[in-house]
């Protein structure tokens, strides 16, 4: 493209529709990128409690969708994101289970490159947001995914409520959980999910980027650093070796 | 039967065009839920309480169920209102054709992308960013810099610039295209400010 557009080494991203569905807009974009030799990522976020139904049914559709991204639509990387129909997040107990099972199923049977994206319920500068992010990072890493992508805090729908600190947690939790035994990770997750799922009905709204970062120097506020340290403590108490 | 070749995008389009017409509501409310439930029962899938599966049988059964879901159900094109089908042999040809190693980004900022398998001690690629969240035009560079400067980040993912030159970046308008291009310019500036100009996006 142009010198200011995406490069071939950037991930050109198209979306499927829910469930097992595509549109002409997506096909047309993919035709152009494939012809140009661009690197392609296709995303799809199966809805738990939607057309598929329960946990196992949603995981079946998720696996079918992931295979289709590669075999029908010629992507190089699939970006997953099972989402809860009630809470609109990827960090619930059920959606983490779907993502983990679907990833492990493909990981066990193929060499395909799999990613997952993050939508937390709580907003930035809150411990809950960081713990939600960490739980998914552990789940994705231990179930064999190759890429973790996020985080869209506040469900990705509130303006300016997303910052680099959430990605720091995503990365640190992924690094700390790489190589863990699966049963050890499940034990950590059981405790960790319990610390935040009780607050789903009243999640902390958190702060906008402008309110928890120094905009001139682009550094997080002392308040956010303290919240981050508290979250690290909670994760250590759950058994994660940070 | 052996596949003639892996499917390309135009092959998929051709099959959509020749596919059976199905009302979208039938697809959503009948075909998808009925087929998913039937396969759950056929493969006796029940995940229990484990977040991450610990037994290979569950993983393999789920893979077979998902593969069968794709092959027996097909795929729906929303604009054409038609269903295309793919064979299992074509699926495996597609899997074989897909690259398993790619490189994101440029120069000293590249991220090497290859299969991890199981819970490898090698960390996954950390792609940081707002993941499509709405971001104000006036702080877009700073928000993206906050990700690019994080030591653990290997790659970036954009947010959505809510306005362009003060105009709402409304979908399916020229402003949407201009805002998208502005996002990419701003992300490049953020990468440069963070000292990682080659980071992939």
Image (cartoon, coloured by chain):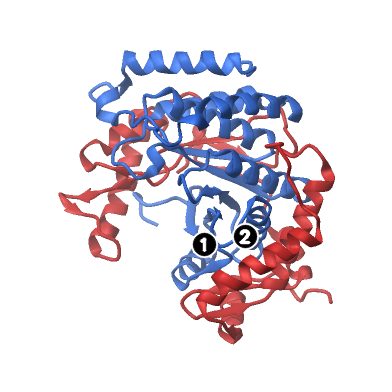
Q: Residue at x 76, y 63 (%)?
A: B92
Say which residue label 2 marks: A65
Q: Chain of mark 2?
A: A
| Chain B visual colour | red
Relative height, residue B37 to residue B147 (above, below): below
Say which residue label 1 marks: A16
The picture places residue A241, in percent across and down from the top left corner, at 63, 16
Q: Residue furthest left?
A: B166
The picture places residue A172, in percent across and down from the top left corner, at 55, 23
Callout 2 touching callout 1 (CB < 8 Å): yes
Instruction: Determine if residue B149 is in view.
Output: no
Q: Secondary structure at mark 1?
A: loop
Q: Secondary structure at mark 2?
A: helix
A218 or A239, nearer to the observer: A239
User: How far separated are the C-alphas under marks 2 and 1?
Assistant: 8 Å
Relative height, residue A94 to residue B35 (above, below): above
Mark 2, Cα crowd under 10 Å, few <14 / some 14-19 / many 20+, is many
A178 or A235, nearer to the observer: A235
The picture places residue B79, in percent across and down from the top left corner, at 46, 77
A172 or A193, nearer to the observer: A193
């Amino acid at each position: 493209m142009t010198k200011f557009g995406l490069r071939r080494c950037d991930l050109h991203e198209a979306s499927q529709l829910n469930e097992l569905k595509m549109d002409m807009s997506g096909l047309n974009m993919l035709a152009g990128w494939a012809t140009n030799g661009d690197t392609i990522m296709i995303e799809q976020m199966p809805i738990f409690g939607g057309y598929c139904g329960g946990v196992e049914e949603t995981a079946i559709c998720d696996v079918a969708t992931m295979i289709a991204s590669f075999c029908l639509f010629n992507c190089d990387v699939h970006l997953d994101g099972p989402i809860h129909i009630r809470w609109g997040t990827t960090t619930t107990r059920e959606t983490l289970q779907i993502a983990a099972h679907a990833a492990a199923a493909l990981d066990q049977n193929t060499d395909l490159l799999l990613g997952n994206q993050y939508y937390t319920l709580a907003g930035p500068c809150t411990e809950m947001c960081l713990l939600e992010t960490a739980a998914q990072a552990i789940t994705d890493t231990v179930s064999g995914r190759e890429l973790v992508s996020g985080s869209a805090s506040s469900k990705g729908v509130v303006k300016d409520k997303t910052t680099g600190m959430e990605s720091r947690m995503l990365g640190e939790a992924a690094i700390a959980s790489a190589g863990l035994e699966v049963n050890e990770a499940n034990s950590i997750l059981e405790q960790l999910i319990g610390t935040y799922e009780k607050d789903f009905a009243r999640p902390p709204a958190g702060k906008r980027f402008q309110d928890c970062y120094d905009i001139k120097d682009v550094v997080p506020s002392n308040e956010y650093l303290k919240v981050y340290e508290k979250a690290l403590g909670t994760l250590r108490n759950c058994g994660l070796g940070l | 039967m052996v596949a003639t070749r892996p499917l390309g995008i135009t092959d998929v389009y051709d099959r959509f065009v020749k596919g059976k017409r199905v009302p979208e509501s039938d697809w959503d409310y009948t075909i998808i839920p009925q087929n998913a439930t039937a396969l759950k029962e056929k493969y006796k899938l029940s995940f229990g309480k484990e977040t991450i599966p610990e037994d290979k049988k569950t993983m393999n059964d789920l893979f077979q169920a998902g593969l069968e879901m794709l092959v027996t159900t097909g795929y729906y094109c929303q604009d054409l209102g038609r269903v295309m089908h793919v064979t299992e042999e074509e699926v495996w040809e597609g899997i074989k054709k897909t690259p398993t190693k790619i490189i994101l980004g440029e120069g000293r900022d590249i991220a090497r992308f290859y299969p991890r398998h199981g819970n490898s001690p090698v960390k996954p690629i950390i792609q940081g960013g707002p993941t499509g969240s709405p971001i104000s035009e006036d702080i877009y560079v700073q928000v993206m810099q906050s990700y690019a400067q994080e030591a653990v980040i290997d790659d970036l993912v954009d947010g959505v610039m809510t306005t362009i030159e003060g105009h709402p970046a409304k979908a399916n308008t020229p402003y949407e295209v201009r805002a998208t291009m502005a996002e990419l310019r701003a992300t490049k500036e953020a990468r440069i400010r963070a000292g990682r100009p080659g980071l992939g996006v």
